[in-house]
Image (cartoon, helix red, strand yellow):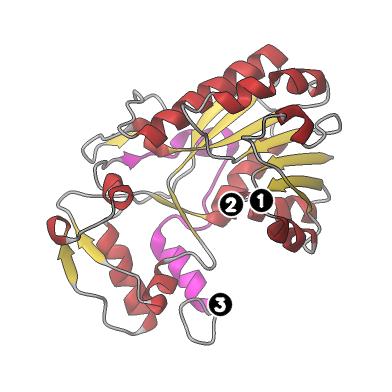
Amino acid sequence: MNLVILGLGYSASVFARRMIAAGWHVQGTVRSLEKATALRRDGIDASTFDARAAALEEAMPDLAQADALLVSIPPSGEGRDFPERLSGSFLQAADRLRWIGYLSTIGVYGDYGGAWIDETALCRPSSDRSRARLAAETSWQELGAKSNVPVVIFRLPGIYGPGRNALMALRQGTARRIVKAGQVFNRVHVEDVATALELSLKSDAASAVYNVTDDEPSAPQDVITFAAALLGIEPPPLIDFADAALSPMAASFYEESKRVCNGLIKRRLRFSPAFPSYREGLRDLRNKGEGTWGGAA
């Protein structure tokens, strides 16, 4: 079986390695030759690709032999340009394709004042990047409908895992305990993202939208406090959001607060996160040496 991944980023690379271990051939794209070379050492047939290329169909990997396609390239512009420009070559290759996955964001929901929401919630994104994600979702769904290929949208929160977590932030001196009343975020461990993708790919494919999150939305400062306790160090001081002097990008995340439910993917695909909260995830990472001077960097 052949899997093509457009955009071998953090989550997609973990998924790629898992599918190779399961016997799949994985072809994927990255922006740099250096990263392509590194991924080839892991058995991934990686090549360079720029979704903004003028001759898009010539630059695309060969989809003719693909049984499945995962798209994790972030949208550009308003979010619809890439799938719409891809339609010619995509439709020609669609005879063999039986699954398309698209990695999106729970940011498409916008702000819900800390309330619990699921996939039935109205999408009212508040940032340009989330509006572009929502437009890209729609464009991929339309392309799949034209091609009679199921499209599964995975809406993800902040992703953490090896090399990218609160333990490492504390070690590197970049962790901050910023407090904003009522603020909560969902998170998800990268291995749980890979599990959700694998379950969907191996299921009787049907178009769907799934929230892939942990079970326990939490205040961001609590995560840093817990990570510091695992490392046996004092956490950084609490900083009020109004005094944090965040970049516009970082501040934009604090403009939205919601508790996102993952019940649908649990019911339909029997998804059971290995790391249902940040506590299990950080403990596992700490046990593997993350955040210690002798551990992962």
Is residue 138 something that shows in the picture?
A: yes
The circle on residue 296 is 3
Judge whether 287 appears above or below 141 on screen: below
Q: Counting other residues with Cα less than 10 Å from the Cα at mark 1, is it few (<14), some (14-19), or many (20 or more)?
A: many
Side of 173 where 144 appears, left or right: right
Query: Mark 2 is on which residue type?
Result: Ser
The circle on residue 197 is none
The residue under the point 25% across, 48% down is: 254
The circle on residue 11 is 2
Label 2 and label 3: CA atoms lie apart by 18 Å
Side of 180 where 273 appears, left or right: right
Q: Position of residue 29 (x, y in %)?
A: 71, 46
Of callouts 1 and 3, which one flags the residue occurring earlier in the amino acid sequence?
1
Q: Position of residue 180 (x, y in %)?
A: 17, 54
Residue, disc 1: 15
- For label 1, the SS is helix
